[in-house]
Amino acid sequence: MKRRHAWLLCAWLAFPALASRQVVDDAGHTVTVPDQVNAIADGWFAHHSVLMTLGAGRKIVATVNHPESQPWMFKITPTLNQALQVRGTAFNPESLLAKKVDVVFTSAGNDKAESYRQAGLPTLQMAFTDYPSLMKSVTTTADVLGTDDARTRAKAYNQYLEAALENVQSKMQGLTAEQRPSVLHIQSLKPLKVDGSHTLIDTWINLAGGKNAAAEIQGNMKEVSPERVLAWQPDVIIIGANCGSIEDSQYAALFSGLKAVKNGKVLQNPAGVFPWDRYGTESALQIQWAALMLHPDRFPGVDIAKVTQDFYQRFFDYTLSSDETQRILHAQKPAEK
C-alpha cells in the first residue's frame, strides 16, 4: 500500500501542468489560471511592456500591437512578429483556442472579456492609472505567470520604480512655485489634443518639478482649440510619440509666438518598447527623463543614456547600442537594416 501511495505521489508531481491556481485580477475578479502559462493573448497595448519586463514577452502568441506603431517592441521581442496580430482590441475566441492560449489579458472594461471566458479562456482584466496601481499590476501579472523568475523580476522592477520616484522627489525638495515651469503635454497635433489633470501625465509633470499648463482640463488626450494653448503660454512643451512636430503642423505660424517655442523649450518625448509618457513600465524612465529636462541643475552627472541602457539590459534583457539609445531618447524608429 505504501508503495502504491508513493507511486501516486510521484505521478502527481510529474504532471504539474494539470494543477491550477487562482489569481485576483486588477478588476477584482478571481480567475483560475493553469499552473503553467506558456501561451498568452494580450489585448491591452500597454500591458505588453509588463510581460516583457517579467521576461514573458516571448510567450505572447496573440497581440493588439503592431511593428509599424511599436517598432522597438517588435525589435526587442522579435517573436511578436510571428504572433497573431489583430486591429483594435478584440480577438476571435476561436483563433485563441486554435493558438492553445493559456490566459488572456485585457484592459479593464473591455467588453470582449466575457466572450473569452465563455469560450473557456482564463481572462484577466488589468488596469493601472498611477504608480501604485502599476506596481500592483506588475505583481498580479507575475502571479499569473506563476514562476519564481517572474516574481523576482516583479519585485526588482517595483523596487526600481520606488527608488526612482523617491530620488526625484528628494531632488525637488524646497522647489518654490515660481521655480516650477508650466508644462504642456501635447499628444496629438491633428487634431490638437493635450493631457490634463487626473492623469499619469499630470502626476509625472508635478513630480518632475513642473506644473501642468492644462490642469484645468481633466483626462487624457482632450481636444482643445489652438487659442486655448496660446492663452496658457506654457514654459515647456512636450510632444508625445508619433505626433510629428509643431514646425511641420498647421499651427507652426500660430504657435511661433509661444514662450516655449521662442525659448527652444519644445521637447520630444522618448518612446521605446512603449511611449514612455503613457502607461507602461518605462514610466520609471519617464519620471527620471522629465525631471532631468525640467531641472538639469538638480541632477549633476546624471547620464540619461546610461540610465536607459541599464534599464533595458536589466528589465528587457536587451543591450542597447549608443545609436539605438539616442533613437529611443528622440522617439525615432530603429535604423533600417
Image: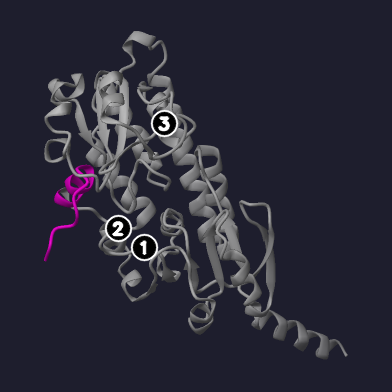
User: Looking at the image, is mark 3 or mark 2 earlier in the sequence?
Assistant: 2
Image location of residue 230, percent across then percent down:
25, 22
When asked about the image quadrant of residue 298, the answer is: top left
Camera sees residue 56: yes
Q: Which residue is mark 1?
A: 65
Residue 334 within the magenta-colored segment of the rendering: yes
Residue 192 lies in what quarter of the image?
Answer: top left
Q: Which residues are magenta?
A: 323-337
Q: Which mark is residue 203?
A: none
Instruction: Tell whether position 237 is magenta.
Output: no
Dot 3 crowding, Cα within 10 Å, few <14, some 14–19, many 20+? many
Q: Disc 1 or 2, which lies upstream in sequence?
A: 1
Mark 1 and mark 2 in contact? Answer it, CB < 8 Å.
yes
Q: Nearer the viewer, residue 316 or 3?
A: 316
N-terminal label among 1 and 3: 1
Amino acid under disc 3: Gly
Disc 2 packing (10 Å; few <14; some 14–19; many ≥20): some
**Any part of residue 146 in sight:** no
Q: Secondary structure at mark 1?
A: loop
Q: Tell me the amino acid under the disc marked 2.
A: Gln
Q: Looking at numbered disc 1 in the image, what kind of residue is underneath it? A: Asn
Q: Which residue is mark 2?
A: 70
Q: Which residue is mark 3?
A: 196
